[in-house]
Image: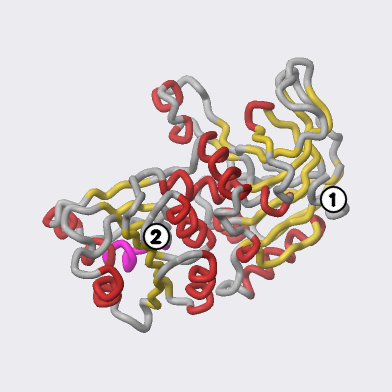
Amino acid sequence: MTQAVMTQPGEIIFHKVPVPQPGPDQVLVKIKRIGICGSDIHVYHGTHPYTKYPVTQGHEVSAQIVRRGNYAKKYEIGQRVVIEPQVFCGRCYPCMHGKYNLCENLKVMGFQTTGTASEYFVVDESKCTPIPDNMTYDQAAMIEPLAVTVHAAKRFDVKNAKVVVFGCGPIGILLCQSLKAFGASQVLATDISDYRLELARKVGADFTVNTKEHDFGKSLIEFFGPDKADVMFDCAGNDITMNSAIQNARKGSTIILVAVFGKMANVDLAKLNDSELDLNTTMMYRHEDYVDAIRLVSEGKIKLEPLMSNHFAFTDYLSAYQYIDTHRETTMKVLIDVDPESDETD
């Protein structure tokens, strides 16, 4: 089979390797689609702090089971699935208490372990989640990032809440939809790109603010009134957005950091303290978030197609990164078609 390997930043080679054989509790899957995310782009540019080269990428993936190990009996051959890419120890305190997304020894496929960028992939059956017949492989490849936002939305009871989302990249826009799906009454999204703000409105944000052109504090009161927001989610991850959240949050309310800061933060903790704000965080997802993400898409409560920017053939993997670099503002999700001949619902 063909496997893609990033040998160093900006370089991908393809080589032939044997099709792997599943162990007793594993399945062999045929990879259909792979999504490229922001962390993958960091690896491409050599700026990801926890990835070494060479590395086979691919963690946002849809696939189909083609072979089973002797003890892998949960799913039939032919079952269409998504893969949860977390590799956890199962023995540390977080793992023993159901929080394996916080495993002390956590590794992620495509970063610290081999990813799915190959024609076939062997994975523990327990890491597979079935997808319904009405879900396409394209949609399924976006369940992983959607699960991130589903998990984030659950970090606060957003039912009937007024919510702010800073940053309208793929995660920010998926979060806007997840918040609405979980019952948020109003969502205000911010960004400095009119293109991204328009997309946020298209899929469900009630209000948007271009913070490069308008004062966020004034806009917040204009849309939500003097009581402001119940909770704010930072999906941009920089000093400007976090300080904006701290300065404009209603006293006693909550800020949740979704984005990963690229460097040490310089934020106003004195104001955070003075306003008795709860600063919370969110990390990846767990199995129940995958299940909820699949359900929300299947029920039509989450729109994924507007975020699909382009498709590239498996052997054009490098071109996909180059496209992203030259279309940064207008690119949401780029998909790699590993098996382009497959019927979307076969």
Q: Which residue is mark 1?
A: 343
Magenta residue span: 236-243
Answer whether residue 184 is magenta in the image: no
Prevailing SS of the magenta stretch: helix
Left or right, residue 309 beside residue 251: right
Q: Amino acid at mark 2?
A: Gly
Q: Which percent across, then down, holds residue 168?
A: 47, 66
Q: Disc 1 and disc 2: Cα gap in Å?
A: 38 Å
Question: At x 32% / y 55%, what residue is drawn?
Answer: 161
Q: Is residue 242 above or below residue 132?
A: below
**Along the polypeptide, which appears first: circle 1 or circle 2?**
2
Number of residues whose C-alpha sits closer than 10 Å to that of mark 1, classed few (under 14), some (14–19) or many (20 or more): few
Secondary element type, mark 1: loop
Could you tell me which residue is drawn at 47 percent across and 60 percent down? Answer: 172
Residue 329: image location, x then y, percent: 55, 74
- How many marks the image carries: the answer is 2
Choose top left, top right, bottom left or bottom right for residue 112. Answer: top right
Q: Point out which mark residue 237 bears.
A: 2
Q: Quadrant of the C terminus?
A: top right
- Front-most of 62 and 134? 134
Residue at the spot 49% in from the left edge and 64% down from the top edge: 204
Depth check, front residue: 230 or 325: 230
Single out the residue that lies furthest toward the left: 274
Q: Is residue 324 visible?
A: yes
Residue depicted at x 55% and y 54%: 301
Kindly check if marks 1 and 2 are in contact, taking CB atoms under 8 A apart as contact: no
Which residue of the protein is positioned furthest toward the bottom in this rendering? 213
Q: Is residue 50 above or below residue 263?
A: above
